[in-house]
Image: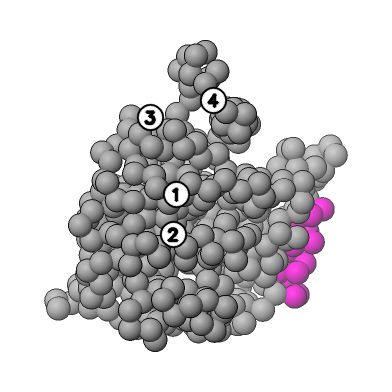
Amino acid sequence: MTDTEDLHPFRVDIPQAELDDLAARLDATRWPAPLPGDGWDTGVPTTWLRGMVEHWRHGYDWRAAERALNAVPQFTTEIDGQRIHFLHARSAHPDALPLVLTHGWPGSVVEFLDLVGPLTDPVAHGGAASDAFHVVIPSLPGFGFSGPVSDGGWTTERIARAWAELMSRLGYQRFGAQGGDVGAGVSTELGRVVPDRVVAVHVNGGTGLPPMPQSDEERAALTELERDRVGRIEAFMQEEFGYIAVQSTRPQTLAYGLVDSPVGQLAWIMDKFREWTHPRSTLPEEIVDRDRLLTDVMLYWLTGTAGSAAYVGYAQPQSWEPAVNSGVPTGVIVFAHDVGIRRYAELDNTIVRWTDVDHGGHFAALEEPELLLADVREFFRGYR
């Protein structure tokens, strides 16, 4: 291999000086006055965020998080001019299927930590050896230890081509793909760029944001569940789209505040965890472990990648036009928060399995790991 194809072992080892700097910044936070009511309708409440910061400062253990990350073999490599960080856990079972898992924004590789053991060693976690996977979990370009980005143009297609190259370097010619959020787009694109190598694709949440009905007749043809999802998409575009507008047009301007203020970075990410976990009325730390939430935030903070993650995560070409159908078998699980609609997903994907679930939210691997694991196992049994 050439130098740029080398795989370099990697361990997370943050200098204590950086953790001391974080503690000092948290202690010196300049807090805004709460807005009237101090509720979630105007953003992250000051009272709630102060409680999270108190735990971050005095209860959270980054070194424990480091140990959890370092328990999974990690590597870096350079692909298409970009440093790529990834976790790679091989199964002891010889017939294991390689599986590349891709996160989204504001997520990270931390989302999948609790799935590594059950996927690679199913027998030890209530499964069968025939369900074993070799697991590859890359950090998206510009995110965490894959950041910052060295140039622009990191569309889901380009990321998918990088993942195909990564799997080649690891010796995996046939593999499956799974992901949610941006990771769902990357996973379906993998099927398009190397359809002869991707045995099947599994996504949570849907294959992409569905188009809006273009006529009264089209809307009338929707089921009650589909009309609910269309209504929630319309509400999202009216009430929540602001962060996408900022991230996709002014990521550098946003980065100054988030890279300089750990509380600002925490608030920006927690706003989405509260909105996208399910049920929305429940505080996010009651759904996802508080320390796991903070570890996700830490990967953005310690690497200073708020700007490049925003730039890559949402600087994607937007089109309602169907893409080319790869023909790769695709399975979808849609939890209660998400808005995937099968009739639209079928326009450019070969949907062979679709599961609607009446609970769970956008962060499937964190919120419903057992249900997601079971669906992934069952789906891929037919494509090994």
Name which residue lies at 38% across and 71% down.
Answer: 136
Instruction: Report which residue position mark 4 lands on.
Output: 222
- Circle 2 SS class: helix
Can you tell which mark lies on residue 379? 2
How far apart are the two marked residues, 2 and 4, measured between alpha carbons? Answer: 26 Å
Name which residue lies at 44% across and 73% down.
Answer: 131
> Upstream in the sequence, badge 2 or badge 1?
1
> Upstream in the sequence, badge 3 or badge 2?
3
Amino acid residing under circle 2: Phe
Name which residue lies at 27% across and 78% down.
Answer: 7
> Upstream in the sequence, badge 4 or badge 3?
4
How far apart are the two marked residues, 2 and 1, measured between alpha carbons? Answer: 8 Å
Magenta stretch prevailing secondary structure: helix
Residue nearer the viewer, 344 or 85: 344
Q: Are marks 2 and 1 in contact (CB under 8 Å)?
A: yes
- Circle 1 SS class: strand
Percent x, y of residue 317: 34, 37
> Upstream in the sequence, badge 2 or badge 4?
4
- Circle 4 SS class: loop
How far apart are the two marked residues, 3 and 2, measured between alpha carbons? Answer: 28 Å
Give the residues drawn in magenta, as a range: 47-59
How far apart are the two marked residues, 4 and 1, measured between alpha carbons? Answer: 19 Å
Residue nearer the viewer, 137 or 62: 137
Circle nearer the viewer, 3 or 2: 2
Instruction: Report which residue position mark 1 lands on.
Output: 353
Instruction: Report which residue position mark 3 lands on.
Output: 320
Q: Is residue 161 left or right of residue 274?
A: left
Height in image: 11 above or below 372? below
